[in-house]
Image (tube, helix red, strand yellow):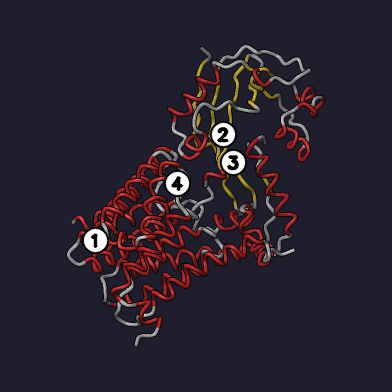
């Protein structure tokens, strides 16, 4: 008799697992556009309550159509993972039409992850302020989600960061934009920003190369640990649960039975870890001071 | 072929986004190009300014009346949208208050302006308000409006000086009707 982990990662259950992860993501992190919500929530709830629907291409094409219709009108302020989720739902539907659904789903997931990370790396290389470390330093000093990091590792008092944040908001709304605005940086923060700059570029480039590398050849066996490392080191600090979840769902879908077979368990664990760590972070329990 | 349609769409949209970033000032964070966390030029680092052009000089509008989608304007500030906003603003009625008037009338000022006073003190510049939201008890001037300039700015971080440095993204100026 199979243990629960063996049953969990069994190839014949993979599609249901990936479908369930995607449906939960659709229910909890869709764009708040009413006609998108009506369609996507309706179809997702139906498929969760009656699981055979998960294997119907029409379900995924319907969800992709509602996502597309809802996203078109707000594309200029839509987060990138909402685009990725739309492509993914379309890919799931198309994979169900293929002669070998598992293989088609795996290929789509692998390419979507590899391409998303490739463009993320290209964006960083083209940006005027990324490689110098200026972007991460500025982010740590102005984005409230990172004030704890700037305080603990950069040595900047929290009140200084909060005061600068309020003054920056006023500058954007009312202030004299001709005058530069001082922020309270430190050499430690600059060093931290440099570290984050090169770590992020390295891990994203690694994921891009590994996922775009031909399947089952050379370094492609390092795909799963690289993507999991990215998820668990990025999203507890940058809590974009929707992005983490779509990556975890696609990661589960592309993971092969060759090599170590329990990667899907770790993707599901990462899926839960990001959700729980975000909840703890939002509770304020970890906020210094 | 059909089975790689989704990755193909990703590439198509991402290439279009890269083009729009360079040609239409789209913020790299948005638009499906996966440029988030690559630059300080995010939507929250952008701001809109409207300036009345009068015979006495330029006057910033304190509370713009927007008939265009603000998120669209900040994330993709193309010239057509800025021109549309400037034209709408030029057709409006505006009252201009001196810094002294604003300082004396803090109590009746909108909450957001009072907040600015509390932190930074009054602005040294005059400010224009829509006539529909005139400040009770204040005699605002009704300047002749020669034109309106709409501007979108972004803040960039200069690591050498630890300063936020404003930079004009795009602007459009129209004559008064």
The answer to whether A199 is drawn above or below residue B151 in the figure is below
Q: Secondary structure at mark 2?
A: strand
Rounded to the nearest whole Å, what is the CA distance between mark 2 and mark 4?
A: 20 Å
Q: Which residue is mark 2?
A: B48
Residue A166 drawn above or below residue B3: above
Q: Quadrant of residue A120?
A: bottom left
**Label for residue B166?**
3
For the residues bearing labels 3 and 2, Cβ distance under 8 angstroms: no
Query: Which mark's residue is nearer the viewer, 1 or 3?
Result: 1
Q: Chain of mark 4?
A: A
Q: Give the camera-side residue of A150 and A86.
A: A86
Query: Are there few (<14), some (14-19), or many (20+) residues within 10 Å of tag 3?
Result: many
User: Quick one: label 4 or label 1, which is nearer the N terminus?
Assistant: 4
- B97 lies left or right of A104: right
Rendered location of residue A19, percent (x, y):
35, 63
| Residue B99 quadrant | top right
- Residue B56 versus residue B75 in the image, above or below: above
* Residue located 49% across and 29% down the image: B68
From what the image shows, is residue B145 above or below residue A192?
Answer: above
Disc 1 to disc 3, C-alpha distance: 51 Å
Marks 4 and 1 belong to one chain: yes
Helix, strand or loop status at disc 1: helix
Q: Residues at badges 2 and 4 in contact (C-beta under 8 Å)?
A: no
Q: Which disc, if any, is residue A78?
A: 4
Distance in Å between CA atoms under marks 3 and 2: 12 Å
């Amino acid at each position: 008799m199979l243990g629960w982990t063996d049953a969990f990662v069994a190839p014949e259950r993979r599609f249901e697992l990936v479908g369930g992860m995607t449906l939960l993501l659709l229910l909890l992190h869709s764009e708040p556009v009413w006609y998108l919500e009506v369609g996507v929530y309706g179809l997702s709830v139906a498929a969760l309550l009656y699981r055979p629907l998960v294997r119907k291409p029409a379900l995924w094409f319907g969800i992709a159509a509602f996502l597309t219709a809802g996203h078109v009108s707000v594309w200029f302020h839509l987060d990138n993972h909402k685009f990725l989720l739309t492509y993914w739902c379309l890919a799931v539907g198309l994979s169900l039409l293929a002669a070998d659904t598992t293989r088609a789903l795996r290929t789509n997931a692998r390419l979507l992850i590899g391409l998303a990370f490739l463009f993320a790396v290209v964006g960083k290389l083209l940006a005027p302020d990324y490689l110098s470390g200026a972007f991460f330093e500025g982010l740590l000093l102005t984005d409230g989600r990172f004030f704890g990091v700037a305080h603990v590792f950069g040595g900047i008092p929290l009140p200084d960061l909060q005061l600068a944040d309020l003054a920056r908001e006023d500058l954007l709304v009312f202030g004299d934009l001709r005058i530069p605005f001082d922020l309270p940086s430190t050499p430690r923060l600059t060093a931290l920003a440099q570290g984050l700059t090169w770590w992020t570029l390295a891990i994203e480039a690694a994921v891009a190369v590994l996922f775009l590398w031909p399947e089952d050849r050379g370094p492609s066996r390092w795909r799963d640990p690289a993507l999991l490392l990215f998820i668990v080191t990025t999203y507890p600090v940058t809590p974009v649960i929707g992005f983490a979840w779509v990556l975890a769902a696609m990661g589960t879908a592309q993971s092969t039975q060759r090599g170590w077979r329990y990667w899907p368990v770790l993707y599901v664990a990462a899926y839960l870890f990001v959700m729980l760590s975000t909840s703890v972070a939002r509770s304020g329990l970890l906020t210094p001071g | 072929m059909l089975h790689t349609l989704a990755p193909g769409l990703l590439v198509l949209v991402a290439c279009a986004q890269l083009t729009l970033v360079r040609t239409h000032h789209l913020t790299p964070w948005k638009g499906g190009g996966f440029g988030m966390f690559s630059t300080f030029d995010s939507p929250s680092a952008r701001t809109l300014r409207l300036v009345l052009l009068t015979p006495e000089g330029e006057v910033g509008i304190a509370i713009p009346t927007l008939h265009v989608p603000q998120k669209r304007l900040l994330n993709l500030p193309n010239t057509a949208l800025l021109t549309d906003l400037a034209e709408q603003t030029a057709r409006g009625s505006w009252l201009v208050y001196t810094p002294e008037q604003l300082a004396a009338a803090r109590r009746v000022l909108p909450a957001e302006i009072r907040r600015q006073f509390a932190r930074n003190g009054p602005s040294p510049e005059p400010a224009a308000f829509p006539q529909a939201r005139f400040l009770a008890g204040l005699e605002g001037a009704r300047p002749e409006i020669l034109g309106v300039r709409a501007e979108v700015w972004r803040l960039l971080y200069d690591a050498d000086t630890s300063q936020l440095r404003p930079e004009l993204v795009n602007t459009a100026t129209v004559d008064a009707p």
